[in-house]
Amino acid sequence: MTYIEFLDVYGGRLIDGTIVTIYQFFLATFVAVVAALTFGLMRLARSPVLRAVAVAYIEFFRGTSLLVQLFWIFFVLPLFGITLDKFTAGFLAVGLNMGAYGAELVRGAVLAVPKGQWEAALALNMAPHNRMRRIILPQAFIIMLPPWGNLIIEILKGTALVALIAVADLMFEVRQINITTFLSAEAFGTAIVIYYVIARFFVTPGMRGLERLMNRRIGKV
Amino acid sequence: MTENMESYPLSLEGDGIPMVRFQNVTKRYGSLVVLNQLDIDVSAGEMVTIIGPSGSGKTTVLRMLMTLETIDDGVIYVEGEPLTHMERNGRLVPASSAHLRRMRSKIGMCFQHFNLFPHMTALGNCMEGPVQVLGLSRKEAEERSLELLDMVGMIEKRDQHPSRLSGGQQQRVAIARALAMRPKVMLFDEVTSALDPEVISEVTSVIKHLVDTHNLTMLMVTHQMGFAKEISDRVCFFFDGAIEEQGAPTKLFENPERERTQQFLNAVLHAN
Ligand SMILES: Nc1ncnc2c1ncn2[C@@H]1O[C@H](COP(=O)(O)OP(=O)(O)O)[C@@H](O)[C@H]1O
Ligand SMILES: [Mg+2]
Protein backbone atom coordinates (compact mmCIF):
# COMPACT_ATOMS: atom_id res chain seq x y z
CA MET A 1 0.00 0.00 0.00
CA THR A 2 1.48 3.32 -1.02
CA TYR A 3 1.11 6.33 1.24
CA ILE A 4 -1.31 7.84 -1.28
CA GLU A 5 -3.48 4.74 -1.04
CA PHE A 6 -3.21 4.89 2.76
CA LEU A 7 -4.49 8.44 2.76
CA ASP A 8 -7.21 7.51 0.28
CA VAL A 9 -8.51 4.76 2.53
CA TYR A 10 -8.00 6.33 5.96
CA GLY A 11 -8.01 10.06 5.15
CA GLY A 12 -11.65 10.41 6.16
CA ARG A 13 -11.05 8.93 9.59
CA LEU A 14 -7.95 11.05 10.07
CA ILE A 15 -9.94 14.16 9.23
CA ASP A 16 -12.76 13.17 11.60
CA GLY A 17 -10.19 12.58 14.33
CA THR A 18 -8.52 15.91 13.64
CA ILE A 19 -11.86 17.69 13.93
CA VAL A 20 -12.49 16.09 17.32
CA THR A 21 -8.95 17.04 18.41
CA ILE A 22 -9.61 20.64 17.41
CA TYR A 23 -12.88 20.66 19.38
CA GLN A 24 -11.13 19.20 22.39
CA PHE A 25 -8.36 21.74 22.01
CA PHE A 26 -10.69 24.75 21.86
CA LEU A 27 -12.85 23.59 24.75
CA ALA A 28 -9.84 22.67 26.90
CA THR A 29 -8.29 26.07 26.17
CA PHE A 30 -11.53 27.76 27.21
CA VAL A 31 -11.63 25.78 30.47
CA ALA A 32 -7.96 26.52 31.09
CA VAL A 33 -8.41 30.27 30.58
CA VAL A 34 -11.45 30.45 32.87
CA ALA A 35 -9.77 28.30 35.54
CA ALA A 36 -6.50 30.23 35.27
CA LEU A 37 -8.22 33.60 35.71
CA THR A 38 -10.42 32.38 38.55
CA PHE A 39 -7.75 30.60 40.56
CA GLY A 40 -4.93 32.99 39.60
CA LEU A 41 -6.90 35.93 41.00
CA MET A 42 -8.09 33.93 44.02
CA ARG A 43 -4.43 33.18 44.70
CA LEU A 44 -3.94 36.95 45.12
CA ALA A 45 -7.11 37.55 47.14
CA ARG A 46 -6.97 39.03 50.59
CA SER A 47 -9.12 36.26 52.05
CA PRO A 48 -6.99 33.34 53.31
CA VAL A 49 -9.82 30.91 52.50
CA LEU A 50 -9.88 31.92 48.83
CA ARG A 51 -6.11 31.76 48.67
CA ALA A 52 -6.08 28.29 50.24
CA VAL A 53 -8.63 26.99 47.74
CA ALA A 54 -6.54 28.33 44.88
CA VAL A 55 -3.34 26.83 46.26
CA ALA A 56 -5.06 23.46 46.69
CA TYR A 57 -6.28 23.52 43.10
CA ILE A 58 -2.90 24.55 41.70
CA GLU A 59 -0.98 22.02 43.79
CA PHE A 60 -3.31 19.16 42.95
CA PHE A 61 -3.39 19.69 39.21
CA ARG A 62 0.28 20.53 38.82
CA GLY A 63 1.51 17.95 41.25
CA THR A 64 -0.17 14.88 39.77
CA SER A 65 -0.16 13.46 36.28
CA LEU A 66 -2.64 14.59 33.64
CA LEU A 67 -3.35 10.99 32.69
CA VAL A 68 -4.27 10.07 36.27
CA GLN A 69 -6.48 13.17 36.51
CA LEU A 70 -8.20 12.19 33.27
CA PHE A 71 -8.92 8.69 34.55
CA TRP A 72 -10.01 10.09 37.85
CA ILE A 73 -12.52 12.44 36.30
CA PHE A 74 -13.85 9.77 33.95
CA PHE A 75 -13.76 6.63 36.12
CA VAL A 76 -13.77 7.80 39.75
CA LEU A 77 -16.10 10.81 39.80
CA PRO A 78 -19.06 8.57 38.81
CA LEU A 79 -18.54 6.76 42.12
CA PHE A 80 -19.32 10.09 43.79
CA GLY A 81 -22.39 10.55 41.62
CA ILE A 82 -20.82 12.83 39.02
CA THR A 83 -20.92 11.12 35.66
CA LEU A 84 -19.49 12.90 32.65
CA ASP A 85 -19.51 11.64 29.08
CA LYS A 86 -16.05 10.89 27.77
CA PHE A 87 -15.94 13.93 25.48
CA THR A 88 -16.64 16.30 28.39
CA ALA A 89 -14.34 14.46 30.79
CA GLY A 90 -11.59 14.73 28.18
CA PHE A 91 -11.47 18.48 27.64
CA LEU A 92 -12.33 19.17 31.27
CA ALA A 93 -9.33 17.19 32.53
CA VAL A 94 -6.93 18.76 30.04
CA GLY A 95 -8.33 22.25 30.67
CA LEU A 96 -8.24 21.99 34.47
CA ASN A 97 -4.73 20.59 34.39
CA MET A 98 -3.37 23.31 32.14
CA GLY A 99 -5.43 25.93 33.99
CA ALA A 100 -3.30 25.26 37.07
CA TYR A 101 -0.20 26.29 35.13
CA GLY A 102 -2.16 29.19 33.65
CA ALA A 103 -3.18 30.35 37.14
CA GLU A 104 0.48 30.82 37.99
CA LEU A 105 0.94 32.80 34.77
CA VAL A 106 -2.00 35.05 35.70
CA ARG A 107 -0.66 35.57 39.19
CA GLY A 108 2.85 36.29 37.96
CA ALA A 109 1.62 38.74 35.33
CA VAL A 110 -0.58 40.65 37.79
CA LEU A 111 2.36 40.97 40.17
CA ALA A 112 4.57 42.08 37.28
CA VAL A 113 2.43 45.16 36.58
CA PRO A 114 4.47 48.05 38.01
CA LYS A 115 3.51 49.18 41.51
CA GLY A 116 3.10 52.72 40.19
CA GLN A 117 0.06 51.58 38.23
CA TRP A 118 -1.71 50.42 41.38
CA GLU A 119 -0.78 53.65 43.10
CA ALA A 120 -1.95 55.86 40.24
CA ALA A 121 -5.27 54.01 40.22
CA LEU A 122 -5.62 54.41 43.98
CA ALA A 123 -4.73 58.11 43.72
CA LEU A 124 -7.66 58.42 41.30
CA ASN A 125 -9.75 56.81 44.04
CA MET A 126 -10.70 53.82 41.88
CA ALA A 127 -12.49 51.00 43.69
CA PRO A 128 -10.51 47.75 44.01
CA HIS A 129 -12.53 45.85 41.38
CA ASN A 130 -12.17 48.73 38.91
CA ARG A 131 -8.44 48.93 39.56
CA MET A 132 -8.12 45.28 38.71
CA ARG A 133 -10.49 45.27 35.75
CA ARG A 134 -9.59 48.56 34.11
CA ILE A 135 -5.91 49.08 34.97
CA ILE A 136 -4.13 45.93 36.11
CA LEU A 137 -5.65 43.08 34.09
CA PRO A 138 -5.29 44.72 30.65
CA GLN A 139 -1.58 45.22 31.35
CA ALA A 140 -1.19 41.77 32.90
CA PHE A 141 -2.84 40.32 29.80
CA ILE A 142 -0.11 41.71 27.56
CA ILE A 143 2.60 40.50 29.93
CA MET A 144 1.26 36.95 30.00
CA LEU A 145 0.50 36.48 26.31
CA PRO A 146 3.92 35.05 25.34
CA PRO A 147 3.98 32.34 28.05
CA TRP A 148 0.34 31.55 27.26
CA GLY A 149 1.46 30.83 23.69
CA ASN A 150 3.58 27.98 25.03
CA LEU A 151 0.89 26.76 27.37
CA ILE A 152 -1.66 26.60 24.57
CA ILE A 153 0.68 24.38 22.56
CA GLU A 154 0.88 22.16 25.66
CA ILE A 155 -2.91 22.04 25.73
CA LEU A 156 -2.98 20.86 22.11
CA LYS A 157 -0.44 18.15 22.87
CA GLY A 158 -2.25 17.25 26.08
CA THR A 159 -5.48 16.54 24.24
CA ALA A 160 -3.84 13.43 22.70
CA LEU A 161 -4.37 11.71 26.04
CA VAL A 162 -8.16 11.80 25.74
CA ALA A 163 -7.79 8.91 23.26
CA LEU A 164 -7.15 6.76 26.33
CA ILE A 165 -10.73 7.21 27.52
CA ALA A 166 -11.91 6.45 23.98
CA VAL A 167 -12.70 9.96 22.79
CA ALA A 168 -12.44 9.56 19.00
CA ASP A 169 -9.77 12.20 18.48
CA LEU A 170 -6.87 12.07 16.04
CA MET A 171 -4.74 9.95 18.35
CA PHE A 172 -7.62 7.50 18.87
CA GLU A 173 -8.18 7.06 15.14
CA VAL A 174 -4.49 6.61 14.48
CA ARG A 175 -4.23 3.93 17.15
CA GLN A 176 -7.22 2.12 15.71
CA ILE A 177 -5.73 2.24 12.21
CA ASN A 178 -2.43 0.97 13.58
CA ILE A 179 -4.05 -1.94 15.40
CA THR A 180 -6.00 -3.10 12.37
CA THR A 181 -3.37 -2.49 9.65
CA PHE A 182 0.02 -2.46 11.40
CA LEU A 183 0.90 0.55 9.21
CA SER A 184 2.58 2.19 12.19
CA ALA A 185 4.90 4.50 10.29
CA GLU A 186 2.11 5.87 8.08
CA ALA A 187 -0.40 6.18 10.91
CA PHE A 188 1.75 7.75 13.60
CA GLY A 189 3.81 9.68 11.07
CA THR A 190 0.70 11.38 9.73
CA ALA A 191 -0.46 12.17 13.25
CA ILE A 192 2.83 13.83 14.11
CA VAL A 193 2.63 15.96 10.97
CA ILE A 194 -0.96 17.01 11.69
CA TYR A 195 -0.21 18.00 15.32
CA TYR A 196 2.85 19.90 14.17
CA VAL A 197 0.98 21.73 11.41
CA ILE A 198 -1.80 22.80 13.79
CA ALA A 199 0.72 24.07 16.34
CA ARG A 200 3.19 25.65 13.95
CA PHE A 201 0.89 27.12 11.33
CA PHE A 202 -2.25 27.95 13.30
CA VAL A 203 -1.71 28.26 17.05
CA THR A 204 1.66 30.02 17.07
CA PRO A 205 0.83 32.57 14.35
CA GLY A 206 -2.53 33.15 16.03
CA MET A 207 -0.87 33.98 19.34
CA ARG A 208 1.74 36.15 17.63
CA GLY A 209 -1.04 38.02 15.87
CA LEU A 210 -2.83 38.55 19.17
CA GLU A 211 0.38 39.85 20.74
CA ARG A 212 0.89 42.27 17.87
CA LEU A 213 -2.71 43.42 18.04
CA MET A 214 -2.56 44.03 21.79
CA ASN A 215 0.77 45.83 21.53
CA ARG A 216 -0.59 48.04 18.79
CA ARG A 217 -3.52 48.89 21.01
CA ILE A 218 -1.16 50.30 23.62
CA GLY A 219 0.75 52.25 21.01
CA LYS A 220 3.82 49.99 20.86
CA VAL A 221 4.89 48.52 17.56
CA MET B 1 -1.67 52.35 66.33
CA THR B 2 0.53 52.21 69.38
CA GLU B 3 -0.67 55.14 71.42
CA ASN B 4 -3.70 56.57 73.04
CA MET B 5 -5.89 58.25 70.43
CA GLU B 6 -7.75 60.31 73.03
CA SER B 7 -5.30 63.18 72.87
CA TYR B 8 -6.45 63.97 69.32
CA PRO B 9 -9.56 65.98 68.48
CA LEU B 10 -12.27 64.05 66.60
CA SER B 11 -12.37 66.91 64.14
CA LEU B 12 -11.04 70.44 63.88
CA GLU B 13 -13.58 73.18 64.45
CA GLY B 14 -13.85 76.89 63.97
CA ASP B 15 -12.67 79.52 61.55
CA GLY B 16 -9.45 79.19 59.68
CA ILE B 17 -9.03 75.46 60.11
CA PRO B 18 -6.15 74.30 57.91
CA MET B 19 -6.80 72.42 54.68
CA VAL B 20 -4.24 69.85 55.82
CA ARG B 21 -2.90 69.22 59.29
CA PHE B 22 -0.35 66.62 60.28
CA GLN B 23 -0.48 66.24 64.03
CA ASN B 24 2.28 64.26 65.68
CA VAL B 25 2.54 61.97 62.66
CA THR B 26 5.07 59.18 62.88
CA LYS B 27 6.01 56.68 60.19
CA ARG B 28 8.31 53.74 60.72
CA TYR B 29 9.60 50.98 58.52
CA GLY B 30 10.63 48.35 61.02
CA SER B 31 13.05 50.09 63.34
CA LEU B 32 13.70 52.94 60.88
CA VAL B 33 11.80 56.06 61.91
CA VAL B 34 11.07 57.88 58.65
CA LEU B 35 8.84 60.63 60.03
CA ASN B 36 9.22 61.61 63.62
CA GLN B 37 6.18 63.21 65.29
CA LEU B 38 5.64 65.56 62.39
CA ASP B 39 3.41 68.60 62.80
CA ILE B 40 2.57 70.66 59.75
CA ASP B 41 -0.38 72.82 58.74
CA VAL B 42 -1.20 73.83 55.19
CA SER B 43 -3.85 76.51 54.65
CA ALA B 44 -6.41 76.46 51.90
CA GLY B 45 -4.90 77.81 48.70
CA GLU B 46 -1.38 77.68 50.03
CA MET B 47 1.57 76.39 47.97
CA VAL B 48 4.01 74.63 50.26
CA THR B 49 7.27 73.26 48.93
CA ILE B 50 9.23 70.55 50.67
CA ILE B 51 12.96 70.40 50.11
CA GLY B 52 15.64 68.36 51.79
CA PRO B 53 18.22 65.65 51.31
CA SER B 54 17.37 62.32 49.77
CA GLY B 55 15.85 59.95 52.31
CA SER B 56 14.66 62.70 54.64
CA GLY B 57 11.00 61.62 54.33
CA LYS B 58 9.66 64.10 51.78
CA THR B 59 7.97 61.51 49.56
CA THR B 60 6.59 59.74 52.60
CA VAL B 61 4.72 62.90 53.66
CA LEU B 62 2.93 63.06 50.30
CA ARG B 63 2.29 59.32 50.13
CA MET B 64 0.69 59.31 53.57
CA LEU B 65 -1.57 62.17 52.55
CA MET B 66 -2.54 60.21 49.41
CA THR B 67 -3.25 57.19 51.69
CA LEU B 68 -0.59 55.18 49.87
CA GLU B 69 1.15 54.56 53.19
CA THR B 70 -0.31 53.69 56.56
CA ILE B 71 0.29 55.93 59.52
CA ASP B 72 1.88 54.57 62.68
CA ASP B 73 1.15 57.36 65.16
CA GLY B 74 -0.65 60.66 65.03
CA VAL B 75 -3.52 61.93 62.93
CA ILE B 76 -3.75 63.68 59.57
CA TYR B 77 -6.72 66.03 59.16
CA VAL B 78 -8.01 67.19 55.79
CA GLU B 79 -10.53 70.03 55.94
CA GLY B 80 -10.74 69.34 59.65
CA GLU B 81 -11.68 65.69 59.29
CA PRO B 82 -9.32 62.85 60.14
CA LEU B 83 -8.00 61.21 56.98
CA THR B 84 -7.26 57.65 57.97
CA HIS B 85 -9.32 57.64 61.16
CA MET B 86 -12.98 58.15 61.88
CA GLU B 87 -15.06 58.79 64.90
CA ARG B 88 -16.91 55.95 66.54
CA ASN B 89 -18.51 56.26 70.00
CA GLY B 90 -16.58 59.42 70.64
CA ARG B 91 -13.19 57.90 69.78
CA LEU B 92 -10.96 57.86 66.75
CA VAL B 93 -10.72 54.43 65.18
CA PRO B 94 -9.14 53.34 61.89
CA ALA B 95 -11.23 54.58 58.99
CA SER B 96 -13.58 52.37 57.00
CA SER B 97 -12.95 52.03 53.29
CA ALA B 98 -15.99 54.24 52.63
CA HIS B 99 -14.49 57.00 54.77
CA LEU B 100 -11.13 56.58 53.05
CA ARG B 101 -12.71 56.84 49.62
CA ARG B 102 -14.59 59.99 50.58
CA MET B 103 -11.48 61.62 52.02
CA ARG B 104 -9.24 60.48 49.17
CA SER B 105 -11.47 62.27 46.69
CA LYS B 106 -10.19 65.57 48.06
CA ILE B 107 -6.61 64.76 47.10
CA GLY B 108 -4.78 64.29 43.81
CA MET B 109 -1.19 63.30 43.20
CA CYS B 110 1.42 63.46 40.43
CA PHE B 111 4.35 61.08 40.58
CA GLN B 112 8.00 61.32 39.67
CA HIS B 113 7.58 58.62 37.00
CA PHE B 114 4.17 59.86 35.77
CA ASN B 115 2.50 56.42 36.10
CA LEU B 116 0.18 57.04 33.17
CA PHE B 117 -1.90 54.03 32.13
CA PRO B 118 0.00 52.69 29.09
CA HIS B 119 -3.03 51.01 27.52
CA MET B 120 -5.03 54.24 27.34
CA THR B 121 -4.58 57.35 25.24
CA ALA B 122 -3.85 60.72 26.82
CA LEU B 123 -7.56 61.47 26.68
CA GLY B 124 -8.44 58.01 28.00
CA ASN B 125 -6.12 58.52 30.95
CA CYS B 126 -7.88 61.76 31.85
CA MET B 127 -11.38 60.36 31.40
CA GLU B 128 -10.81 57.19 33.40
CA GLY B 129 -11.32 58.66 36.86
CA PRO B 130 -14.24 60.96 36.01
CA VAL B 131 -16.11 58.07 34.31
CA GLN B 132 -15.25 55.18 36.63
CA VAL B 133 -15.09 57.02 39.95
CA LEU B 134 -17.15 60.19 39.67
CA GLY B 135 -19.76 58.56 37.45
CA LEU B 136 -19.72 61.30 34.81
CA SER B 137 -21.11 60.47 31.38
CA ARG B 138 -18.48 59.89 28.72
CA LYS B 139 -19.47 63.17 27.09
CA GLU B 140 -19.07 65.21 30.26
CA ALA B 141 -15.81 63.47 31.11
CA GLU B 142 -14.48 64.11 27.63
CA GLU B 143 -15.37 67.80 27.77
CA ARG B 144 -13.69 68.18 31.12
CA SER B 145 -10.62 66.23 29.99
CA LEU B 146 -10.21 68.13 26.75
CA GLU B 147 -10.36 71.41 28.62
CA LEU B 148 -7.58 70.26 30.93
CA LEU B 149 -5.49 68.77 28.13
CA ASP B 150 -5.78 72.12 26.42
CA MET B 151 -4.65 73.88 29.56
CA VAL B 152 -1.52 71.71 29.81
CA GLY B 153 -0.87 72.11 26.09
CA MET B 154 -1.51 68.50 25.19
CA ILE B 155 -4.72 68.75 23.20
CA GLU B 156 -3.15 67.73 19.86
CA LYS B 157 -1.72 64.60 21.47
CA ARG B 158 -5.00 63.50 23.01
CA ASP B 159 -5.20 60.30 20.94
CA GLN B 160 -1.61 59.24 21.58
CA HIS B 161 -0.64 56.49 23.99
CA PRO B 162 1.94 57.33 26.67
CA SER B 163 4.64 55.31 24.88
CA ARG B 164 4.46 57.87 22.07
CA LEU B 165 4.91 60.86 24.37
CA SER B 166 8.06 62.42 25.80
CA GLY B 167 8.55 62.55 29.56
CA GLY B 168 7.50 66.18 29.76
CA GLN B 169 4.39 65.46 27.73
CA GLN B 170 3.52 62.45 29.88
CA GLN B 171 3.89 64.49 33.04
CA ARG B 172 1.59 67.19 31.68
CA VAL B 173 -1.03 64.55 30.87
CA ALA B 174 -0.59 63.17 34.38
CA ILE B 175 -1.28 66.63 35.81
CA ALA B 176 -4.43 66.91 33.68
CA ARG B 177 -5.51 63.42 34.79
CA ALA B 178 -5.19 64.35 38.46
CA LEU B 179 -6.98 67.69 37.98
CA ALA B 180 -9.87 66.00 36.19
CA MET B 181 -10.92 64.61 39.58
CA ARG B 182 -11.27 68.19 40.89
CA PRO B 183 -9.16 67.63 44.01
CA LYS B 184 -8.82 70.32 46.66
CA VAL B 185 -5.24 69.39 47.44
CA MET B 186 -2.65 68.56 44.79
CA LEU B 187 0.54 66.71 45.59
CA PHE B 188 3.57 66.87 43.30
CA ASP B 189 6.41 64.48 44.09
CA GLU B 190 9.55 65.50 42.21
CA VAL B 191 7.55 65.74 39.01
CA THR B 192 10.53 67.09 37.06
CA SER B 193 13.23 64.78 38.42
CA ALA B 194 12.85 62.16 35.68
CA LEU B 195 12.84 64.74 32.88
CA ASP B 196 15.55 65.91 30.53
CA PRO B 197 16.67 69.42 31.49
CA GLU B 198 15.30 71.04 28.35
CA VAL B 199 11.71 69.91 29.01
CA ILE B 200 11.54 70.72 32.72
CA SER B 201 10.09 74.14 32.01
CA GLU B 202 7.08 72.67 30.12
CA VAL B 203 6.02 71.10 33.39
CA THR B 204 6.99 73.86 35.78
CA SER B 205 5.15 76.43 33.68
CA VAL B 206 1.98 74.33 33.92
CA ILE B 207 2.32 74.24 37.70
CA LYS B 208 2.98 77.96 37.76
CA HIS B 209 -0.16 78.51 35.71
CA LEU B 210 -2.11 76.43 38.23
CA VAL B 211 -0.81 78.51 41.10
CA ASP B 212 -1.79 81.72 39.30
CA THR B 213 -5.25 80.69 38.17
CA HIS B 214 -6.58 78.08 40.61
CA ASN B 215 -7.27 78.20 44.27
CA LEU B 216 -5.73 74.79 44.86
CA THR B 217 -3.84 73.82 47.95
CA MET B 218 -0.54 72.34 46.85
CA LEU B 219 2.26 70.38 48.41
CA MET B 220 5.28 69.97 46.22
CA VAL B 221 8.53 68.10 46.69
CA THR B 222 11.22 69.41 44.37
CA HIS B 223 14.93 69.79 43.81
CA GLN B 224 14.36 72.84 41.59
CA MET B 225 15.33 75.50 44.09
CA GLY B 226 14.77 78.39 41.70
CA PHE B 227 11.30 77.17 40.90
CA ALA B 228 10.51 76.59 44.58
CA LYS B 229 11.61 80.11 45.44
CA GLU B 230 9.55 81.59 42.64
CA ILE B 231 6.19 79.97 43.31
CA SER B 232 6.02 78.85 46.94
CA ASP B 233 4.19 80.61 49.72
CA ARG B 234 6.27 78.62 52.18
CA VAL B 235 9.23 76.31 52.01
CA CYS B 236 9.86 73.48 54.47
CA PHE B 237 13.33 72.06 54.80
CA PHE B 238 13.21 68.43 55.88
CA PHE B 239 16.00 66.67 57.65
CA ASP B 240 15.84 63.18 59.11
CA GLY B 241 12.07 62.91 59.11
CA ALA B 242 11.40 66.26 60.72
CA ILE B 243 11.07 69.89 59.68
CA GLU B 244 14.43 71.47 60.39
CA GLU B 245 13.39 74.92 59.24
CA GLN B 246 10.48 76.51 57.40
CA GLY B 247 9.50 79.93 56.23
CA ALA B 248 8.85 82.27 53.34
CA PRO B 249 10.98 81.36 50.31
CA THR B 250 13.01 84.57 50.34
CA LYS B 251 13.80 84.10 54.01
CA LEU B 252 14.65 80.41 53.76
CA PHE B 253 16.73 80.63 50.62
CA GLU B 254 18.48 83.92 51.32
CA ASN B 255 18.72 83.90 55.05
CA PRO B 256 18.52 80.38 56.41
CA GLU B 257 18.94 80.22 60.17
CA ARG B 258 19.90 76.61 60.72
CA GLU B 259 23.29 75.26 59.90
CA ARG B 260 21.88 72.16 58.19
CA THR B 261 19.75 74.30 55.92
CA GLN B 262 22.75 76.37 54.96
CA GLN B 263 24.82 73.25 54.28
CA PHE B 264 22.07 71.72 52.17
CA LEU B 265 21.49 74.86 50.13
CA ASN B 266 25.21 75.35 49.58
CA ALA B 267 25.58 71.77 48.42
CA VAL B 268 22.63 72.07 46.03
CA LEU B 269 23.70 75.43 44.63
CA HIS B 270 27.22 74.21 44.02
CA ALA B 271 25.94 71.11 42.30
CA ASN B 272 24.00 73.25 39.82
N1 LIG C 1 8.62 50.85 51.58
C1 LIG C 1 9.71 51.18 52.31
N2 LIG C 1 10.31 50.27 53.09
C2 LIG C 1 11.38 50.59 53.84
N3 LIG C 1 11.92 51.81 53.89
C3 LIG C 1 11.37 52.76 53.14
C4 LIG C 1 10.24 52.51 52.30
N4 LIG C 1 9.89 53.64 51.67
C5 LIG C 1 10.77 54.57 52.08
N5 LIG C 1 11.67 54.04 52.95
C6 LIG C 1 12.75 54.78 53.63
O1 LIG C 1 12.20 55.90 54.23
C7 LIG C 1 13.09 56.99 54.17
C8 LIG C 1 12.39 58.20 53.59
O2 LIG C 1 12.04 57.93 52.26
P1 LIG C 1 11.40 59.02 51.31
O3 LIG C 1 10.21 59.60 51.97
O4 LIG C 1 11.20 58.38 50.00
O5 LIG C 1 12.56 60.08 51.24
P2 LIG C 1 12.76 61.29 50.23
O6 LIG C 1 11.56 61.41 49.36
O7 LIG C 1 12.95 62.49 51.11
O8 LIG C 1 14.01 60.99 49.46
C9 LIG C 1 14.28 56.53 53.36
O9 LIG C 1 15.31 56.19 54.26
C10 LIG C 1 13.78 55.32 52.67
O10 LIG C 1 14.82 54.41 52.44
MG1 LIG D 1 11.39 61.21 47.25
Image (cartoon, helix red, strand yellow):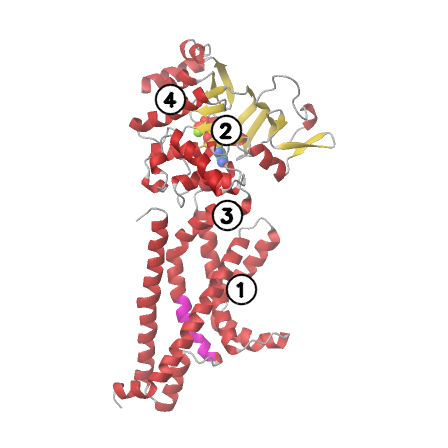
Labels 4 and 2 in the same subunit: yes
Q: Is residue B99 above or below residue A27?
A: above
The segment highlighted magenta reads: A154-164
Establish whether ligand 1 lies closer than 8 Å to the Cβ of label 1.
Answer: no
Q: Is residue B21 above or below residue A115?
A: above
Check disc 4 and report the residue beneath it.
B224
Residue mark closest to the camera, 3 vs 4: 3
Chain letter belonging to callout 4: B
Residue at 43% over, 47% down: A112
SS of the residue under disc 1? helix
Check disc 2 and report the residue beneath it.
B62
Establish whether ligand 1 lies closer than 8 Å to the Cβ of label 2.
Answer: no
SS of the residue under disc 3? helix
Chain letter belonging to callout 2: B
Residue mark closest to the camera, 3 vs 1: 3
* Residue A150: x %, y % from top left: 38, 62
Question: Distance between the Cα atoms at labels 3 and 2?
Answer: 24 Å
Could you tell me if the residues under marks 4 and 2 are in contact, i.e. CB atoms within 8 Å?
A: no
Label 3 vs 1, first from the N-terminus: 1
Establish whether ligand 1 lies closer than 8 Å to the Cβ of label 3.
Answer: no
Check disc 1 and report the residue beneath it.
A60
Could you tell me if the residues under marks 3 and 1 are in contact, i.e. CB atoms within 8 Å?
A: no
SS of the residue under disc 2? helix
Question: Distance between the Cα atoms at labels 2 and 1?
Answer: 45 Å
Residue mark closest to the camera, 1 vs 4: 4
Residue A10 visible? The answer is yes
Residue mark closest to the camera, 2 vs 1: 2
Residue at 53% over, 57% down: A38
Chain letter belonging to callout 3: A
Which amino acid, by three-letter code, is at mark 1?
Answer: Phe
